[in-house]
Amino acid sequence: MLQNASQGGCVLVLGNSRTEEMRGVLQSVQAAFPKKEIVSVSRLSELDAQTVQPELVLIYQNWPDEFSGQTLTELVRKFPVSRFLCCFSVWCEADGRTRNQWPVSIRVPARAADFRIRQEAEVIRGTAPAYPLTAGRDEIFQYQVESGLEATTGSLAGKRIGVISADPPYREMLEALVVSWGGTIAVPSLLCQADLWLYDLDPWEVVQTRLLTQGEMPACIGLMGLFHPETETAARLLGVDTVVSKLAPVQELFAAVIRGLQLKVTPQAEH
């Protein structure tokens, strides 16, 4: 949508919104901000900051180095009171390790952007707290847990969840989440009796071999840091019901767990 002179309180989109991944992000923006004008430009140089005062600036990053390291600095200079969110494609998922143009506090995978966009809408409306641009991963994780704690506490009561990961700190974090949701951790010797598995699929080459020889298993949520659609398809073919990015908001993982448990009980209810 072209910009005009009356774009106060709009949503500004910077980048290419026509790719398959970003089309889904745009739909989420339209749903979260139904009464807001959406101003779209492909490059920052096309923008007239004097006529556009966005409440949210949404950056669509389709490939690494698409934007220079000065882009965020320039955006903050132009729009010092705006909220910022960078939605990145699967090709950019390693940027958090190899590049740092965008702070971790505003980066979200395009596939997991829907919840975060709705969260930003709540922040702008004043119904949810916001963490600062400088927030680190630990602060963001704690915020996500606390912001969804009331809705999730006790939700997994009576459910046994198996947590499988070769990364001890990550496994402990997942176990703490399960306990905060009211669930019980299945001991390793009784994993087969769990209601659901949270399976760390990294490194995929190693885990893939294990899944090839894995017998029957309960509902299974796979977690991966960096993955492409073909990897997700391969995991599903090996019995994983859903793959969730490790970079996704905690609430997305919780929603996947609830769906997984519902899938397990539905066939039983039909008998």
Image (cartoon, rainbow, N blue to C red):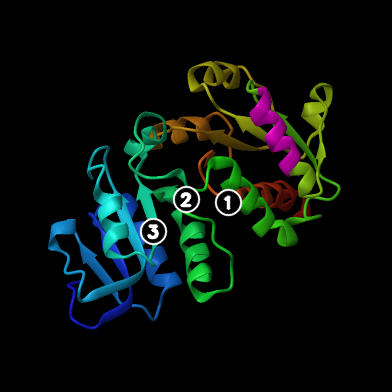
Looking at this view, is 61 or 112 the one in front?
Answer: 61
Depth check: 254 or 7 in front?
7
Residue 169 on the magenta segment: yes
Along the horizontal axis of the image, is 140 left or right of 57? right
Tell me what residue is drawn at x 37 percent, y 51 percent: 87
**For the N terminus, which image quadrant?**
bottom left
Per the image, the residue denoted by label 1 is: 252
Give me the residue at 17% from left, 72% from top: 2
Whether residue 117 sits left or right of residue 138 in the image: it is left
Kind of residue at disc 2: Ala
Residue segment shown in magenta: 168-177
Label 1 environment density (alpha carbons within 10 Å; few <14, some 14–19, many ≥20):
some
Q: Main secondary structure of the magenta part?
A: helix
* Residue 84: assigned label: 3
Q: Which label lies toward us, 3 or 1? A: 3
Q: Is residue 260 above or below residue 57?
A: above
Is residue 171 within the magenta segment? yes
Q: Earlier in the sequence, mark 2 or mark 1?
A: 2
Q: Sort mark 3 into few (<14), some (14-19) or many (20+) by Cα contacts within 10 Å.
A: many
Describe the element under mark 1 as helix, strand or loop. Answer: helix
Cα–Cα span, label 2 and label 3: 16 Å
| Residue that badge 2 annotates | 112
Q: Secondary structure at mark 2?
A: helix
Say which of 147 and 133 sits in front.
133
Q: Nearer the viewer, mark 2 or mark 3?
A: 3
Q: Earlier in the sequence, mark 3 or mark 1?
A: 3
Tag 1: amino acid? Glu
Residue extending farthest to the left is: 46
Picture layout, residue 209 above or below residue 69: above
Q: Position of residue 16 (x, y in %)?
A: 22, 54
Dots 2, 1 in contact, CB < 8 A: yes
